[in-house]
Amino acid sequence: MKFLKIKILQISLVFILEKLVSTEWITKMSSYFDTVFFENTILIHEFSTPSRLKCIQKCILFETTCQFLQFTLGKRCELYSSIQKEIFNGNVDIYLRDKKLPRIHFLNGSFLDRLQIFNMAKVSFNLSRNGINQIVPLAFATSNKTETLDLSFNNLTILYSKSFYGMINLKTLDLSFNQISQFESDVFKENSSLAFLHLENNFLKYLNGNIFDNLQWLRLLNLECNQIEVLDTNTFKNLKNIRKIYLGNNNLKSLDPFFHNLELLSLLDISFNKIKTVHKDAFMSRHNLSDILISNNQISEINSETFKGVNYLEKLDLSSNRIQKIDVNFTSNFPNLKELHMSNNNLSFIETRFFNGLEKLEILKLYNCNIRNIDLNSLKNLKVLHLGANKITLFSQNLSSLTELLLTGNPLGNLTYPLISSQNSNLDVLGISNCKLEYIDFDILKNLTNLRTLGITGNQLVFNNETFNGFRNLENVYIDQYYANKFKTVFPNIRFSIL
């Protein structure tokens, strides 16, 4: 008898607790609800229904994800996890959902389980910024129609093998800005349709060799801003359709042949690592690779085979390395190169024939390279040239296609010769600020008939009311403050500014 009473009491308590936990308060919002608004408005679900009660019931099914609901006169229900104050704006059809008794909140470290997304047959899930720290296996088992899942800005630390089980049509998965440091090896086994995978800004140090084996349709992989030190040579081997790989801001120390079989790879970003060496076969037969970004590393020498195999390369960024020696035949590998960045290296001597093979080059940036002399006359298609902060005392080149020339911070002294020696110059922007200029023959600058912007501040020049007469198309002049104030009324068609 005593045992029966205890059992009845236990059942009663469970029943009462279940009723208490399910207690919901749905309150019509007013202008007094200032404290409930967020920076972003996130719509998680919407559907048509003639019943406000069904709208409330659907919100409750979303557990803690649904915080606001709107039931309009048009018999439409919209569920939100957050709203901005501007969205509310006195709208009387928006309700605040509030559970007055204890429950598990995402922001208190809850997990995402299958019950919370049951019957949510959505093509797109936005679960960003919900404080989720765990996805239990089979949580998305019923989400076989979902194509986009955003789990960014949560507190995830590990992904289990069945975390995304059932998401057979998933194409975009965003796991960025979490704290992920570990995957189970087959976490993406069920997601063969995945095309875009974002894993940037996590705590990954190592990637297993078969982690991406089943992602043969992946087109973009972002692994930026992790702590990756080592890559297995087989990590990317099955990514037959990959176009873009972002590995910037990691701790890689060498670049080995990680990218074999990636016939469609067009962009590789490995900037901001600790790379000192590039294997001679790292890019072997990568004919579709058009962009390599390898800036802000520790490379000290470039030889003729460093990037061998990328014959169709269009952009190469080697800026902010420690390059002191570069082979004269290096550029012969890039007949299609259009953009070359080598700023912030010690390239005090560049041989004249170094640029001979770059007939299609349009953009060249060599800022702060300790350059004293340079011959660029072979670059007939060059449009943008940045040579600031070098040691050039004389610059005169036959670059008729050039539209932008920055020589800022070079000790030019006097300017009595044409910077562009060709008769038909297309120069639109010229920067000669802080060049220790004491004298300029302004007739030479006035011959640049397409010049629209001139930077000339920080020199030792004296200007008068005739200085800027005769420029055909000049619109903007960056000059010292005294002259900027003085010439605003003298030359009303030219805008004078200070840097």
Image (cartoon, grey):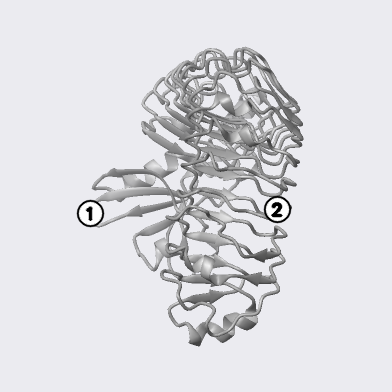
Q: Which residue is mark 1?
A: 74
- Counting from the top left corner in percent of width and height, residue 376 is at 58, 43
Quadrant of residue 364 in the image?
top right
Quadrant of residue 211 in the image?
top right
- The numbered mark at residue 303 is none
Question: Taking 272 as reference, is 485 above or below it?
Answer: below
Q: CA distance from mark 1 to mark 2?
A: 71 Å
User: Which amino acid type corresponds to the residue marked 1 in the rendered image?
Assistant: Gly
- Would you say residue 54 is visible in this rendering? yes
Disc 1, SS: loop
Residue drawn where x is 34% and y is 60% of the image: 93
Q: Specify which label sits upstream in the sequence, 1 or 2.
A: 1
Residue drawn where x is 70% and y is 27% of the image: 228
Task: Pick the residue in front: 265 or 93.
Answer: 265
Answer with left or right where residue 437 lies relative to residue 24: right
- Counting from the top left corner in percent of width and height, residue 218 is at 47, 22
Q: Which residue is mark 2?
A: 392
